[in-house]
Image (spheres, grey):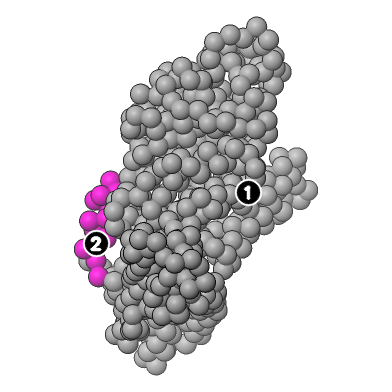
Amino acid sequence: MTAVGYRQLWAADPGAWRASGVLWAGLTGPVERRAGELGGAAGRLRDGWSGAAATAADARLTGLRDELTSIAPALVEVDQVLAELAGRLVVAKARLGAAVALADAAGLVVDRAGGVHPDPARARPTEQAGPAAARVAAALRDALDRAEAADRGAADRLDELARAAGAGWASPPPPGRPAAGAAPALVLAWWSGLTPTQRRWLVGHEPALVGALDGVPVAYRDQANRLRLGAWREELLAERRRLLARVPPGPAASVRLRALAARSAGLDGLAGRLATAGEPRAYLLGLDAAGEGRVVVALGDPDHADRVLTYVPGMTAGLDDAPGELGRAARVLDRCAALAPGERSSAVLWLDYDAPDFLSEAASAGQARDAGPALHRFQEGLRASHEGPPARQTVLGHSYGSLVVGTAAREHGLAADALVFVGSPGVGATRATELGVPPGQVWASSASDDVIRLARPADELARRALLGAAPLAAVLGWPDRTGHELWFGHDPADPGFGGRVFPSDRRGHAGYWDPGNPALDGIARVVLGR
């Protein structure tokens, strides 16, 4: 491998590397189908053939199926490696462009070999030209060093995969697995003690375990959960078949069928995003198709990002909403890229809790309290598995999700450098200092036309609901309201809460992510630490 030069980096096409990775990952479908066919053939063989030859044939078919199963995680890993390379090249090229712009502003030019010289078309260089040239040269070197490190890292990982192809993809690990809900630091210590072949064996044979363990590096969780997508889709189809078997289906079954169709559409939309070559790559960190569905997806690899946002949505969020909620996270990430093209950011949609469906449920903090331990553990996992200097971690809660974030921060603590609340009905605290993040790092925004601003404290909501008031009337429309108490405590967007407030246009309860809204810019600047 040779050093990356100026012309090489300038001409590099990150999109081509990303697209190549997607093609590799796309091979998992044919591999899984072939493995299923071999499993079916083995089953038919056992039904109609016995004896020594049959036993030997069965063992051979089983071995072939296991070999195919072990290849699938490696195919996803190639996609991850090439996507990681592409992302790092994007940052390096942005820094290269900034260095060239710096040279132009100083009356300098960069030649095809990356040398820095005075521009002959300009006036005679000033005595400041020397220091300016040194700054430009340093910026160029930084960009090229980053590209070379990316190239070297990708080459090393692909070399390891090539060696594994010859020596065997996977080998069983020793006994002993972390318990569900184990501390992420303990999970990472266990994982770090395994060999690469043992890790691939666990991904291929115990994907449900690997995909759910906070503290396992993001790449392996993504591999495991992607391998389970087909099983989750089959769960939804099986549920649909059970409902349709009822002739005629009753009203309750019809409602469930509509909800099931929405969940299936959400899963299909999510699978489509996972399969695209779009920037940034999506990492599937958790999925549960049962009930209304839960999902955790990262855009960009949090383990290698400089800045990481965890976004917690609110009321009615479920698997059917996942593509739309992921779009909100993507808009924040796009704004971060526009503000800081030379930095690597990641945004995580965290919907690993049972969000309220109705106002009567949203009147209680119970579901937020139930979500607290899982959010705490997830943030600890991000901190544990991150490589290199710690990332700046920001947690954003919208609507009821802000109560989830606030409750987790107050009762369990969050590995977060900043908290952001938008459209909040209260965060379960009376002061920003109760939330345990550094001073000045609690932020909030509330649009003047957001209906949440009219919310009453929870006890008043419950009292009116019990008196038979209409659900919306139980929440809104008290013209005599004074003070800043909402459903769940002091309004975090009130300066008296002790946090910091950023503006939002009049875009209602769901418009904080709209293009052009200053709230979107504010969220991105908090994520970047600006």
- At 42% from the left edge and 30% from the top edge, which residue is drawn? 442
Amino acid on which disc 1 is placed: Gly
Report the front residue among 469 and 379. 379
Name the residue at the front extreme: 124
Does 176 lie within the magenta span? no
Q: Report the magenta residues as a range.
A: 181-195
Q: Residue furthest right?
A: 248
Q: Is residue 327 above or below residue 61?
A: above
Q: Is residue 220 left or right of residue 495?
A: left
Tag 2: residue type?
Ser
Specify whether 273 is left or right of 49: right
**Quadrant of the rendered image containing residue 453:** top right
Q: Residues within 10 Å of mark 2 (few under 14, many from 20)?
A: few
Compared with 9, 128 (above or below) is above
Viewer-proximal residue, 100 or 201? 100
Q: Residue at x 52, y 15 (%)?
A: 485
Label 2 sits on a secondary structure element that is helix
User: Can residue 51 be spotted in the picture?
Assistant: no
Per the image, the residue denoted by label 2 is: 192
**Which of disc 1 and disc 2 is earlier in sequence?**
2
Q: Which mark is residue 432?
A: none
> Which residue is identified by label 1?
324
